[in-house]
């Protein structure tokens, strides 16, 4: 079970949300389950994911925490780990895949350590191991999040960029970060390719 969902039910949720039944999200479901099981049920928690791959989707599927509402933060260390912490005190739990516990689960080990090319993986066996292992491949440690991370930043006043004309937080500078350059992969500002008649995008 993953947060009251059967393994098959959760797999369906993952496919609908992510586009495929990714092993990382399936393992992430068990990690979320373990973390919440170690914490008081009445608490209000934020989450840190230490990887941007797959694990954040497990959090967003199973909890109210999302990147959009700011309750989920990605701090990419490259480690497959997550932490739930109290919004106000910063005390929490970190859950990570423990390499020392992967002995009985060779397919999970090969997936995590990239010992087998993806096209050569035995997907059915891998999923079977993920279902059977659950949170047994994980370890837990208590954490205290830095006070600075608990501070809620306010958006501040909004200004119209004198370069592109779009609204942006005025505290970011005299012109918006897009027009300063180096931020976006499609030019120095959003007008780079010229405007499109929106009717052209909606007409059949």
Image: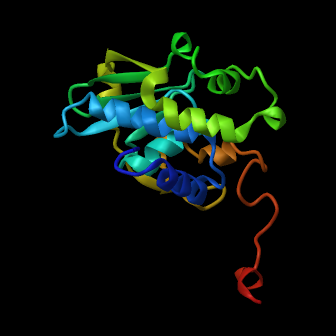
- What colouring method underlies this structural image? rainbow
Q: Quadrant of residue 194?
A: bottom right
The percent coordinates of residue 45 (x first, y second) are 28, 37
Nearest the viewer among 201 and 96 is 96
Q: Name the residue: 56% across, 13% down.
A: 99
Q: Name the residue: 69% across, 19% down.
A: 113
Task: Residue at the far bottom: name it.
Answer: 204
For the C terminus, the image quarter is bottom right
Q: Quadrant of residue 39?
A: top left
Left or right, residue 157 beside residue 19 = left
Q: Name the residue: 51% across, 14% down.
A: 101
The percent coordinates of residue 52 (x first, y second) are 59, 35
Left or right, residue 83 beside residue 193 = left
The percent coordinates of residue 94 (x first, y second) are 38, 22
Nearest the viewer among 152 and 85 is 85
Q: Name the residue: 55% across, 25% down.
A: 80
């Amino acid at each position: 079970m993953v947060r009251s969902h059967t393994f098959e039910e959760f797999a369906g949720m993952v496919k609908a949300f992510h586009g495929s039944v990714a092993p990382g999200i399936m393992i992430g479901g068990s990690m979320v389950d373990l973390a919440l099981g170690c914490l008081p049920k009445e608490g209000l928690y934020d989450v840190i994911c230490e990887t941007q791959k797959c694990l954040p989707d497990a959090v967003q599927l199973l909890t109210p925490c999302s990147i959009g509402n700011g309750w989920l933060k990605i701090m990419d260390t490259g480690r497959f780990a997550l932490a739930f912490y109290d919004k106000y005190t910063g005390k929490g739990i970190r859950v990570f895949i423990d390499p020392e516990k992967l002995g009985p689960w060779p397919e999970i080990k090969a997936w995590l350590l990239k010992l087998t090319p993806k096209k050569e993986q035995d997907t059915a066996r891998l999923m079977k191991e993920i279902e059977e292992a659950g949170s047994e491949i994980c370890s837990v440690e208590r954490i205290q999040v830095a006070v600075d991370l608990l501070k809620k930043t306010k958006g501040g006043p909004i200004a119209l960029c004198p370069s592109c004309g779009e609204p942006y937080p005025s505290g970011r500078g005299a012109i918006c970060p897009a027009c300063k350059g180096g931020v976006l992969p499609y030019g120095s500002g959003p007008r780079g390719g010229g405007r499109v008649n929106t009717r052209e995008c909606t007409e059949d």
